[in-house]
Image (tube, rainbow, N blue to C red):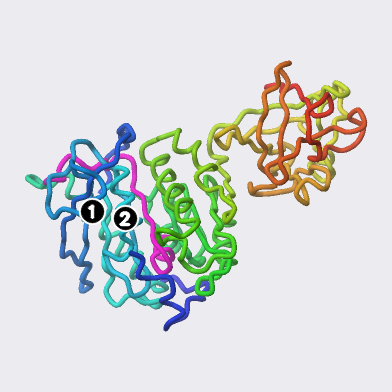
Amino acid sequence: MPMRRRSFLGLGAAGAAGLGLSLLNAPGARAAAPTQPFAIGVRDFNWSRGSRQLFTRIFYPISGTPGGEPVRNAPIAGGVFPVVEWSHGLGGNSDSYASQVRALVSAGFVVPAPSFPNSSPQETYNGNQSRDVSEVISRTLALNTTSGDMFAGRLNTGVGVGAAGHSLGGMTTHGLLTAWPDPRVVAAVPVACVDMGNPSSSVKANVLFIHGENDGTCPYSSARQAYSELPAPKAFLTHVGADHGSYLVPGNPTYNQTQNTFLDWFRWRLYDDTAARDRLTADATSGGTRWEADLAARPSSVISLRSRANNQYVCAENAGGSPLIANRTAIGPWERFDLVDLGGGAVALRAQANGQYVCAENAGGSPLIANRTAIGPWETFQRVNNADGSISLRAQANNQYVSAPNGGANPLVANATSIGPSESFDLISG
């Protein structure tokens, strides 16, 4: 049994805070992403894993007027739907997270929601709950080939599955990526989790973390560590100053950011909905949130930047050890960057000399330097296409333009409020 690497979650009232929130086939083609919301059906199953009883409610799309209560055993809507499992937190059950589950179903997902037996931190740390989820996923997918079942032929088993959950459920979800891996999981959203172990090489998933900055139950720092350890594609939605789960409650000021972001995360990966991917930054952004995304597994272009101020190329001096400066007359390894498309016009620059991302240090107050291993606000730039064919880069950290000051003789810095020759660059491919 994998040993518990980190244990933070406490029992009692603190542990319950924020709860009470109301077999794969060969890879196949993704169905088109739904454009209209669905009404919701529900079926109950009394499954088990050995001696562990796994009562599971499966919520699923049906025809009818969206927004009402789930209809028991109603016929599934026309179409083929991906599966996204939802794991409840301490003291919860299949119905505890109605807002999140119903939103997923309305958007076109089949959502099995198990009620874990004897749910507790111990059951999470010993892997029982993660193994329970794998069993529920297997049982759900098997319905796709069960003769006479309403789900037969209606589950998209060729695209992988999604998994999500809050608190102990978030830890259970992270366990599927680490200590008790399930390679069928290709999209995951651990909400208010702690780090459950080292990433497994067998799981290739897009992972979105959602967490309150002042979470007193599952420390923010542990989720940040989990985020740093996982490979891209990944993202982190921070609710600034928030607690363990208030942002999951309808009416909370950042509730919409939570819902829209995790829905589009699953639509992107399981429906191949690139419009959803490109909405992520807008989904997540508000005065009460902070968004970080490293979607580097998406295609990127190799480019060089030539400053219009002096017609010289931007260089990652000393393989990224010194500030960027436009002082080279020819292109070599230090002048080549991967231009990483983050969607919605946002980009990051990764220096080929050292494989690290260009950062607008101190929110643009220091020269740009290629010294970061992950993409956050300081590594994110908005690409601006200028009328003269050049481009400019506006730093997300301070909304100011990258400039090659003093005719390109000084290091690049993101401190310009308007675009002139020093803020204009020719983008050279290859």
Q: Is residue 215 left or right of residue 132?
A: right
User: Residue at (70%, 49%) from the top-left corner?
Assistant: 372
Q: Magenta stretch containing residue 213, yes or no?
A: no
Q: Which residues are magenta?
A: 150-173
Q: Which mark is residue 336?
A: none
User: Residue at (41%, 69%) from the top-left corner?
Assistant: 168
The residue positioned farthest toward the bottom in the image shown: 12
Do the residues bearing badges 1 and 2 touch, measured as CB atoms within 8 Å? yes
Figure check: 397 above or below 313:
below
Which kind of residue does numbered mark 1 sit on? Phe
For disc 1, the marked residue is 59
Figure check: 35 above or below 219:
above
User: Residue at (31%, 66%) from the top-left corner?
Assistant: 96
Residue 412's quadrant in the figure? top right
Q: Give how far across and how far down residue 15 sits, in percent.
A: 44, 77
Q: Give how far across and how far down residue 23 sits, in percent.
A: 25, 49
Residue 194 appearing in the image: yes
Q: Magenta stretch containing residue 165, yes or no?
A: yes
Q: Which mark is residue 101?
A: 2
Q: Is residue 333 left or right of residue 154?
A: right
